[in-house]
Amino acid sequence: MRIAVTGGAGFIGSAFCRHIMKRDDIEYLVVLDALTYAARLENLESISDDRRFAFVRGDIRIPSDVSDMLSRYRPDVIVNFAAESHVDRSISYPSLFIDTNVKGTGVLLDEALKHGIKRFHQVSTDEVYGDTEIESRRRFREEDPLLPSSPYSASKAAADLLCLSYRRTYGLFVTISRCTNNFGWGQHAEKLIPKTIERSLRKERIPIYGSGENIREWIDAEDHSRAIEWIINNGESGEIYNIGTGLELSNIALVRMILRMTGGSESLIEHTEDRKGHDRRYALDSSKFTRLSGLSLTAEETMKSLERTIELLSCKTSSTSL
Ligand SMILES: NC(=O)c1ccc[n+]([C@@H]2O[C@H](COP(=O)([O-])OP(=O)(O)OC[C@H]3O[C@@H](n4cnc5c(N)ncnc54)[C@H](O)[C@@H]3O)[C@@H](O)[C@H]2O)c1
């Protein structure tokens, strides 16, 4: 397989690249990434010397950047991770999110068509469904309506719809995965888990929106990568796959867990004004993916991975940045 990964220098894109390069049937993998503030090229160091690997600096919003990469490398598959991904920033700079996440995906789809790409996979999010009441037991299914709350989730929902329209209108082979919150190595320090670890170790205030009762479902970025690997090999065109584990944690419970594991005091927690339009609870029904793929991602195993990840990130943070 010849594969192009857009946004491959980001947190999950790089985890996917490291994962997929373990396969012998990868003829080559090319990463196209604009290297925004969120990119971390060091996340690709372990595979950068592999002769099957190439990196191109380029912007998915610029047709010639995408076209030049596709002409040169002629991949069979595009996996699109490239996005502005932080909800808080989308509230401050919505137009940047529309530009990258909607227009950028549109450019990729156009170029995929022109270059005869065999498969296009769009990495989406559970946030496109909107939220449920905290007490609710509802889990979103793939056919549920899209009711995004933030400019981030609305831009991702728009991108999903564009992908589906390119399948219906032009016959492009398109798959979409909608995944829950990821944890793992190499995530930008603006995100909840790395930020809380760093602040706990530095004994700095840990801001938490409102009461912190908002619930998120969590997955290891490694497991997300395995799920996408299955989809690009077995997924069917036009299909959407929810990817979750059932591990639901409120933000405050997660912060307390990190404080316990890093020796931080709960007095560091500072409840701040709630995020605008803050989603209360996300939860996915991932039974379609589990049934078809046979990959079972359980809450118990995910909790163990989360604990291991917090331990490892704490050691790394202590040794590098304190
Ligand atoms: N982080 C999560 O928990 C989560 C959950 C579900 C889905 N997702 C989705 O997964 C994808 C990856 O998320 P992440 O957390 O790794 O994001 P990230 O912010 O860590 O990485 C995004 C990458 O995209 C690149 N990029 C941004 N704009 C670009 C452009 N115009 N052209 C080319 N490259 C560009 C950045 O340089 C960066 O390397 C996103 O599409 C996101 O919506 C993330």
Image (cartoon, helix red, strand yellow):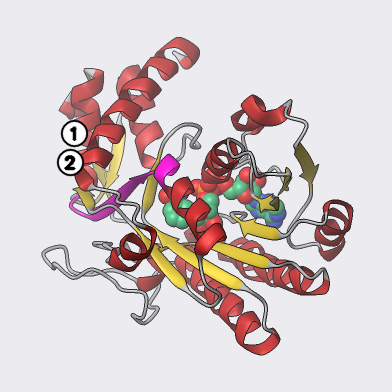
Q: Position of residue 204 (x, y in %)?
A: 33, 24
Q: Relative to 221, say whether 177 is above or below.
A: below
Query: In the depicted view, which residue is nearer to us: 112 or 197?
Result: 112
- Amino acid at dot 2: Ala
Q: Secondary structure at mark 2?
A: helix
From the top left corner, tell me how far across and down residue 318 is, in percent. 40, 13
- Residue found at x 79% / y 69%: 111
Residue sitting at x 51%, y 32%: 186
Between 52 and 96, the one nearer to me in the picture:
52
What residue occupies the far top of the structure in this picture?
319
Q: Is 188 displayed left or right of 38 in the figure?
A: left
Q: Which quadrant: the C terminus?
A: top left
Mark 1 residue element: helix
Task: Inspect the magenta stretch and tell me whether residue 244 lies in it.
Answer: no
Residue 218 located left or right of residue 238:
left
Circle 1 is placed at which residue position?
256
* Residue 252 seen by the camera: yes
Q: Is residue 223 left or right of residue 9?
A: left
Which quadrant holds residue 178? bottom left
Q: How many numbered marks appear? A: 2
Q: Is residue 218 above or below residue 91?
A: above
Q: Position of residue 96 (x, y in %)?
A: 63, 61
Examine the rendered structure and indicate whether residue 59 appears above or below residue 102.
above
- Percent x, y for residue 151? 49, 67
Kind of residue sitting beneath label 1: Arg
What residue does disc 2 label?
253
Query: Which image quadrant for residue 203?
Result: top left
User: How far is the residue under mark 2 from the one under mark 1?
Assistant: 5 Å
Over which residues does the magenta segment extend?
A: 212-223
Contact flag, marks 2 and 1 (Cβ < 8 Å): yes
